[in-house]
Amino acid sequence: MSSLIEEYKENKHLYQSLLIQAKHSIESLLRNEDIEIFSIEARLKDENSFKEKLQRKSDYKTLSDIEDICGLRVICYYESDLQKLRKLINENFKVLSSSDKKEESEVDKFGYSSSHFIAIFKDNWLQNPIYNNLGDLKFEIQIRTMLMHTWAAISHQTLYKNESDAPRHMRRTFSQLSALIELADEQFSRIKKMKDEYTHENEVESTEFKKLELNSDTLVQLMNHYFPCREVSNESIPTLLYELKTYNLFVSDFDNRIQKCLPFLDEMESKVAARIDRPLPLWSMEGICRAILDLTNEDYFYSRWDDEDGGPTIDIYHDYREKINYNT
């Protein structure tokens, strides 16, 4: 055991590098595949944890026999994203072994857990000098949804790993809760699928689309149609939608306002950016929406601006409001 501990100490810097590069690689792959996740957790076994592992299991002969010195956990939002993550891992790393804890769990295990992979970098990664000394080092990747992660974190605190470990009167409650969490995961994936289908079913230029109520989906779809390269902040959409729906209940209302402003927006944005010495593009999707309302609705404009102290660009807004004839 002491020789393995010494070997780990000597090679710990390599595992630290492995952890950094493995995390960076997965983050890059996720960006390239446009897979949105909640977080990536990364951890390296410290020396105390390493010693405890050796004490629990004494049949390790070499350091390479220990496969979870370096570990990463990818937490996604939806159960439907797990298959995308499995595909990404299998295609981009050399997977030595894998397991699905949910599928393999015995019926007396509470809940369900993550999928685990033991992997090393493929040869094409190792051609990069950053990776070339990491070729034989194994790392573990776990993938799970946020609800799986919540279940694992909370149930871990109960100290009951198997149903038989819990007092009898608690078992039914644990089983019910486990089923509810699994059902919730499935239903969130179903809602996401319904949302995607709803978005793709409606063509922006169709009459049917313009009759729809203005909501977060139709707003983003409409704005991406007219302004496809603008930054969208999911956090800002509820507040923005509340402001828009005060004046516009249907897609057609806001679409008409966009078309009135469209010939002037680029020129106006350039003037505003020059006046305040900011680079282009100046406005995010949220900024464009508010500019459109400023130009087409007097009440909204004066709820945000004061002629006596309207800031350095208020005259620009006044000029374009006159051009557009804001009384719609």
Image (cartoon, grey):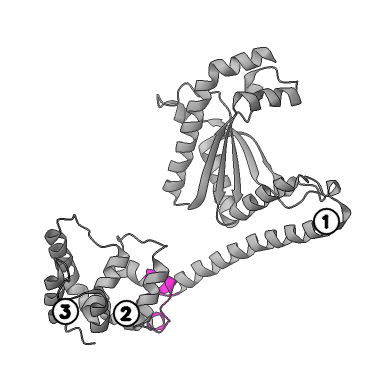
Task: Report the residue that reaches farthest toward the right.
Answer: 168
Three-letter amino acid code of the residue under disc 2: Phe
The residue to which callout 2 is attached is 254
User: Where residue 259 sits in the image (x, y, percent)?
Assistant: 24, 78
Q: Which mark is residue 8?
A: none
Under tag 3, what secondary structure?
A: helix
Three-letter amino acid code of the residue under disc 1: Met
Mark 2: few/some/many CA within 10 Å (<14, 14-19, 20+): many
Point 54% across, 18% down: residue: 11
Point 25% across, 82% down: residue: 297
Under tag 2, what secondary structure?
A: helix
Distance, label 1 to label 3, CA atoms, is: 67 Å
The residue to which callout 1 is attached is 170
The residue to which callout 3 is attached is 321
Mark 1: few/some/many CA within 10 Å (<14, 14-19, 20+): few
Query: If you read the primary sequence from the N terminus, does the residue marked by circle 2 or circle 3 appear first?
Result: 2
User: Where residue 24 sits in the image (x, y, percent)?
Assistant: 45, 37
What residue range appears in magenta? 202-221
Three-letter amino acid code of the residue under disc 3: Arg
Task: Report the residue that reaches farthest toward the front.
Answer: 308
Quadrant where the image shows the C terminus: bottom left
Distance, label 2 to label 3, CA atoms, is: 16 Å
**Picture quadrant where residue 139 is located:** top right
Magenta-span inclusion, residue 254: no
